[in-house]
Image (tube, rainbow, N blue to C red):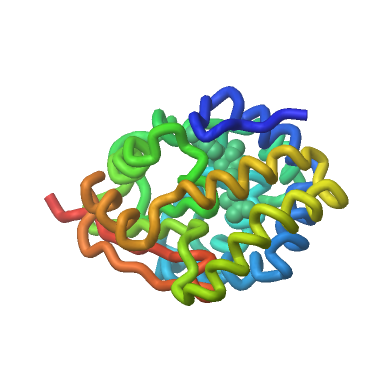
Amino acid sequence: MSRATLEKDPRDVASMFDAVARRYDLTNTVMSLGQDRFWRRATRAALRIGPQDKVLDLAAGTAVSTVELATSGAWCVAADFSVGMLAAGASRDVPKVAGDATRLPFGDGVFDAVTISFGLRNVVDHVAGLREMARVTRPGGRLVVCEFSTPTNRLFATVYKEYLMQALPRIARAVSSNPDAYVYLAESIRAWPDQTQLAHQIADAGWSSVRWRNLSGGIVALHAATKPQR
Ligand SMILES: C[S@@+](CC[C@H](N)C(=O)[O-])C[C@H]1O[C@@H](n2cnc3c(N)ncnc32)[C@H](O)[C@@H]1O
């Protein structure tokens, strides 16, 4: 079985997701107690996309997030560097591209909107990833980052930390095709910047009007931003 460490070597991360791919969608729904669908819908709404838009869903994995975005009528492409994850979503009828978040295979300013769900935390240099997302977005275009974050209620945060470190790896042993990956998941969530810190990093990467909204009490945060006009 394979898992990445907090150094997030891209080869380890990609092969960890290859090994998770077969049962990723099911595990995701079980682990999130069914909240994953709500988080995907909220991401689409925050991106404010419509039939006129070209949208990049970065770190799209099995393209489950891309299919939700495409319900808006926008043209949406899924990009990911785990070929195993893309292959697991082969039956999903959206375009798919293999590519690394820090060196995207797209020209400057080609997208109206770019989004990344539960992917940014895994990118070895996530600020470089945010800069690369700005490069491929047109001036005035939009960004939404959907990522695990810090629960706002202190008591709830304590219960959640216990869930992450104790229950989640056990559930993964019953459901996942690569349970070790869920130890990495718990560790990487704990080490991830909170809402305010991530907002500063998004601004440092060249985005403007950065704001966020908490979902599920701050278990997840949606950060939105705009690519500045030239
Ligand atoms: C937890 S999955 C999220 C999949 C999907 N967005 C969702 O919401 O279910 C994280 C994905 O990020 C991808 N990923 C991590 N680092 C990446 C990178 N540097 N470039 C491209 N994809 C990356 C992984 O391969 C994996 O498929």
Q: Which residue is drawn at 77% across and 54% down?
A: 27
Q: As drawn, which residue projects farthest toward the top? A: 11
129 or 67, nearer to the observer: 129
Q: Residue at x 23, y 53 (%)?
A: 203
Q: Position of residue 98 (x, y in %)?
A: 57, 32
Residue 198 falls in which quadrant of the image?
bottom left
Does the rendering let one see residue 102?
yes
Q: Position of residue 165 (x, y in %)?
A: 66, 53
Q: As drawn, which residue projects farthest toward the right? A: 174
Q: Quadrant of the N terminus?
A: top right
Q: Residue at x 45, y 49 (%)?
A: 192
Residue 43 position (above or below residue 76): below
Q: Position of residue 26 (x, y in %)?
A: 79, 56
Q: Position of residue 204 (x, y in %)?
A: 22, 47
Residue 95 position (above or below residue 66): above
Left or right of residue 216, residue 132 in this image: left
Locate ligand 1 by image quadrant. Answer: top right
Left or right of residue 126, residue 40 in this image: right
